[in-house]
Image (cartoon, helix red, strand yellow):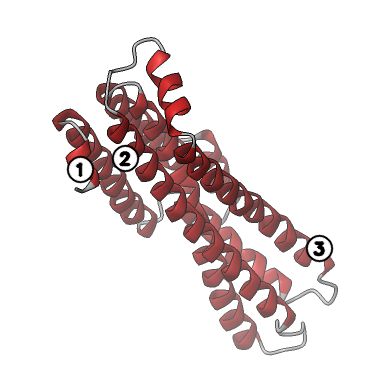
Amino acid sequence: MTIFTLLSIWDVAALAAFVALWTGYTIQADRLTGQGHSLLAATARARRTWMRSLCDREVRVADTALMGNLMRSVSFFASASVLIMGGLVALLGAGDKAYAVIQDLPLTESSGRGAFEAKVMLLTGVFVYAFFQITWSLRQFNYCCILLGAAPMPEAEAAVKDRFAENAAQLNALAANSFNRGLRAYYFALAMMTWFIHPGVFVAASVAVVAVLYRREFRSKTLRALNAALPP
C-alpha cells in the first residue's frame, strides 16, 4: 500500500495541481531572475557592489556584522523547520486525537484516518525539503564569511579586487537563492495545510500562494525601489 492509494481521486488531483504550480512557478521564477527581473536579481547587483566596496575598506567590521545578520535570519528558519518536523511527527503519534479535531472543524471533508496520515507525511516532506534548502543556504553563507576574511586589501590591483567581488557576490547570491527556495516551501506548506479541509480549498490556496509570491518577487514596490537605488 502506498500513500497515493490512501487518497481519494480528488486528493490526488489536488496534489498534482499543487506540484505543478510549485514546479512551474520555480521554473518561471528562475527564468525571470536570469533575465534580471526579480528581487533576487536586484539584490545580486547590490551584492556585487557590496563586495567591490568591501575591497576598498581596511576596516570591515560593518561587513561582518551584515553577514552575521543574514546568517541569523537563515538560522531562525533552520531551527523552526526542525521544530515543525518534530511537531508533525508527534502529530502522527497522536493520530486519533488529531484526526478527531480535524474532522470536527466546520466545512472539513470527511476522509479516512489513512488519508489524514498520508497528508501529514506529505506535509512533513515539504518541511524536510525546506530544511535542506535552508541549511545549505546557511553553509554557503559560512563560506562567504571565509571569503570575507580572504578579501584583497585596498592596495591590491583593481583586477584582483574585481575578480574577488564577482565571485564572492555570486556565492552570496547562491546562498540567498537557496534560502529563497526554502522560504518558498514555507509558503506552499501553508497552502498544503488547507488540504485537511478540502482538496478544492487546497488548490485555491496554492493558486493564491503563487499569486502572492509572483507579486512580491516581480511586481512589488520593493523591487521598484531596489532597481531605482542600484546601478543597472
**Residue placed under numbered mark 2 in the picture:** 118
Relative horizontal placement of residue 229, taking residue 116 as reference (left or right): right
Amino acid type assigned to the residue bearing label 2 in the image:
Ala
Work out how far the residue at label 3 is from the one at label 2, CA to CA, in angstroms.
Answer: 48 Å
Residue 160 figure quarter: bottom right
* Secondary structure beneath label 3: helix
The residue closer to the viewer here, 160 or 80, is 80
- Determine if residue 219 is in view: no
* Secondary structure beneath label 2: helix
Work out how far the residue at label 1 is from the one at label 3, CA to CA, in angstroms.
Answer: 52 Å
* Secondary structure beneath label 1: helix
What is the x, y in percent for residue 21? 27, 41
Q: In the image, what residue occupies the spot 35% across and 21% down?
A: 197
Q: In the image, what residue occupies the spot 48% across and 40% down?
A: 93
**Residue placed under numbered mark 3 in the picture:** 62
**Residue placed under numbered mark 1 in the picture:** 4
What is the x, y in percent for residue 14? 22, 33
Amino acid type assigned to the residue bearing label 1 in the image:
Phe
Q: Is residue 107 above or below residue 77?
A: above
Work out how far the residue at label 1 is from the one at label 2, CA to CA, in angstroms.
Answer: 8 Å
What is the x, y in percent for residue 24? 26, 47
Dots 1, 2 in contact, CB < 8 A: yes
Q: Is residue 68 above or below residue 103?
A: below
The residue closer to the viewer here, 180 or 80, is 80
Q: Nearer the viewer, mark 1 or mark 3?
A: 1
